[in-house]
Amino acid sequence: RRKPAMDLLLAASEQAKVNPRTQTTSPIVTGASVLAITYKDGVMMMADTLASYGSMARYKSVQRVEKVNDGTVLGASGEFSDFQYIKDLLEDLTDEEFDMDDGCQMLPQQIHSYLSRVMYNRRSKVNPLYNQLVVAGYDSKKSESYLGAVDMYGSTFKDDIVATGYGMYLALPLLRKGHDKKMDESAARKLLEKCMTVLFYRDCRTINKYNIAKVTASGVEISKPYSLPTQWGYKRFVNPHLTE
Amino acid sequence: MDVLNPYGGNPKGYLSTPGPDRNGEHMMGTTIMAVEFKGGVVIGADSRTSTGSYVANRVSDKLSKVHERIYCLRSGSAADTQAVADMVAYYLDMHSVEIDSPPLVKTAANLFKMITYNNKDRLLASIICAGWDEKNGGQVYSIPLGGSLVRQPFAIGGSGSTYIFGHCDAEYKKGMDQKQCEAFVSKAIAHAMSRDGSSGGVIRLAIITKDGVERKYIPGDKLPFMKDE
């Protein structure tokens, strides 16, 4: 079942036999879906805390939603080491800004733009960063939310609703149905939690432990890890062989 | 389409390509376990059936009855194991009428072996057969991929079992009673489900004794140990 883009990467592995420096490796330690939506006060992003090693649930307390600066958070799915590398790049940027000490802070759209260039450039060298990134933030001066995504090929877009991985298939329809730009914080949280629960049921590479982040005019808040209730008590779950 | 013949048949099989073609098939990456005790056996399994990394069924029943007091635990291809279990149940039914008594667990296990061994090029089935009969009491037999047959005091199988070999070897004690076996099985399966992405959902247990089969259900939010993940 090859996706067309895979042929590019497979050709690269052939190249790799000639020049190992350009080898494209497949992801080893990976994170699953990230979901994000805009709401009345800003943006909210949610992801589970698992980094899988193939089918193994290897690292169960990992944070895949990280603060970039007071106005932006970054969430990532895919190769975890590449996410850590990207975090280092962004830290270099924010350090430079801090040293400048001119009162300016990078806007979420600037971070999004920077990351999209990084991702596209890596893809063009056929040595991608194996991630799907979600950039979410709040521009305090304009009082506007910002939400966008970049993938490993450098495809970039902005939207009020963003999902990666299995979330694209399972959560996006639910988010689109339940989303309202003017929804309040608890409604936004409930919607994201409902979708994460569906993903926990239906994606093998998830666990029931999450971080939720919100970015508003008052800054960035990332929750401590927490779990959600799950339903296993239906009659036909307990006994699938019932006949009436 | 070639009918699955328990005695083998065309050794080349229906497919001309070497090895099975399993794209998109339902697999039961899984955790299954069976333990023998004095009065019978305790068997247990998770409830996840996955297609790739999608959970096709989060509440599957992997404990299949092949006779009143003989069950099998299935791992591998969902279709293959269901077909094989159905065949064994059919043959056991005929056989028990012929001998006018409940069949031996050993017979059931040998039937599993016969089918999986003779069709080894066409099947992806790894099965644990466990039950109680009057002659030999509780018994657990492993029938892994190639079609070998091994009797064991306890058996684990499926992708999740790799995570609990150490745990089971450390925790198993000879001469455990029913309650201890239940605790042993549910704790081990919970540990496997916690680490194996292909196992999950609920824990289904069954206790098979001369008095019949008692089924138990441990929902996914009440698993035995849930240390801060």
Image (tube, rainbow, N blue to C red):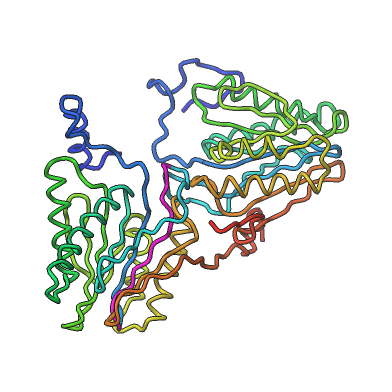
Q: How many marks?
A: 0
Q: Foreground: A217 or A47?
A: A217
Please say if B115 is above or below B226: above
Q: Foreground: A91 or B205?
A: A91
Q: For residue A33, what is the image quadrant?
A: bottom left
Q: Is residue A106 left or right of residue B27?
A: left
Assess whether residue A50 is covered by the magenta stretch: yes
Residue found at the very far top of the displayed protein: B11
Residue at the (70%, 45%) spot, across then down? B185
Q: Foreground: A30 or A218?
A: A218
Q: Foreground: A148 or A101?
A: A101
Q: Residue B51: x, y in percent?
A: 44, 45
Q: Is residue B180 left or right of residue A33?
A: right
Assess whether residue B17 is covered by the magenta stretch: no
What secondary structure do most residues of the magenta stretch adopt? strand
Q: Which residues are magenta?
A: A41-54
Q: Is residue B100 left or right of residue B7?
A: right
Q: For residue B166, what is the image quadrant?
A: top right
Q: Residue B106: x, y in percent?
A: 76, 26
Please say if A23 is above or below A175: above
Q: Residue B192: x, y in percent?
A: 58, 45
Q: For residue A18, what is the image quadrant?
A: top left
Please say if B159 is above or below A77: above
Residue at the (46%, 56%) spot, across then down? A61
Q: Is residue A172 left or right of residue B179?
A: left
Q: Residue A31: x, y in percent?
A: 37, 52
Please say if B22 is above or below B188: above
